[in-house]
């Protein structure tokens, strides 16, 4: 069995659906951090069968909306002095900014490069978001 040291302080992103850790790594720009980041892929899980885990050896601000959009089943654990001080359960965010790019060629975001891509949650059950400018639909995978 693989053993990764426990954290004294930092963030553990747990219950990631197997195979999604690298997507989260890229979205959160974890490559820019000046601390240790451990990615554990396909770890055994009683609840999920297989899961990914990301351990960050630093207390950093994490965009919970991005995480909730990618995988609303994720748990974010904040560690300090070797113990769990906070556990955050995620959900689909009501709005995401610059996470999804609008694919409508007639949308204002296609013409005006500086405008933020903002999508609002239209249907939580189906994971459907809509562009606030043109109503273009985006379906979560």
Image: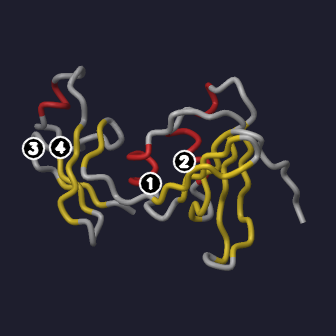
Residue holding disc 3? 134
Disc 4 to disc 3: CB gap under 8 Å: yes
Helix or strand or loop: what does disc 3 sit on? loop
The mark lying in front, picked from 2 and 1, is 1
Q: CA distance from mark 4 to mark 3?
A: 8 Å
What secondary structure is found at the residue carrying circle 1? helix
Q: Secondary structure at mark 4?
A: loop
Say whether residue 67 is left or right of residue 9.
left
Which of disc 1 and disc 2 is earlier in sequence? 2
Q: Is residue 90 left or right of residue 79?
A: left
Image quarter of the N terminus: bottom right
Nearer-N-terminus badge (4/1): 1
Q: Is residue 32 above or below residue 59?
A: above
Q: Nearer the viewer, mark 1 or mark 3?
A: 1
* Mark nearer the N terminus (1 vs 3): 1
Mark 4 vs mark 1, CA separation in Å: 21 Å
Task: Please give the residue where the numbered disc 2 appears in the rendered image.
Answer: 23
Q: Residue 3: percent from the left, percent from the top?
A: 88, 56
Mark 2 or mark 3, earlier in chain: 2
Separation of residues labelled 2 and 3 (CA atoms): 27 Å
The numbered mark, 4 or 3, whose residue comes first in the sequence reads 4
Residue holding disc 4 = 104
Q: Nearer the viewer, residue 88 or 122?
A: 88
Tag 1 residue = 70
Query: Of the residues tagged 4 and 3, which is closer to the observer?
Result: 3
Using a 10 Å C-alpha cutoff, classify the residue at mark 3 as few (fewer than 14 neighbours), some (14 to 19) or many (20 or more).
Answer: some
Residue located at (74% from left, 65% from top) = 43
Question: Viewer-nearest of labels 4 and 1?
Answer: 1
Q: Residue at x 24, y 44 (%)?
A: 103
Residue 85 or residue 89, whichever sits in front = 85
User: From mark 1 to mark 3, how far is it between C-alphas?
Assistant: 23 Å
* Disc 2/disc 1 C-alpha distance (Å): 8 Å
């Amino acid at each position: 069995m693989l053993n990764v040291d426990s954290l004294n302080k930092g963030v553990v992103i747990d219950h990631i659906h197997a195979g999604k850790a690298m997507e989260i790594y890229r979205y959160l720009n974890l490559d820019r951090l000046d601390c240790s980041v451990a990615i554990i892929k396909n770890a055994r899980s009683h609840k999920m069968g297989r899961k990914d885990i990301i351990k960050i050896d630093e207390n950093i601000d994490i965009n919970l909306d991005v995480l909730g959009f990618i995988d609303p089943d994720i748990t974010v654990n904040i560690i300090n002095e070797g113990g769990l001080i906070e556990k955050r359960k995620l959900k689909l965010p009501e709005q995401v900014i610059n996470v999804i790019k609008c694919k409508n060629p007639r949308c204002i975001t296609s013409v005006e490069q500086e405008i933020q891509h903002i999508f609002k949650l239209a249907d939580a059950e189906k994971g459907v978001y809509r562009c606030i400018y043109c109503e273009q639909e985006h379906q979560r995978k």
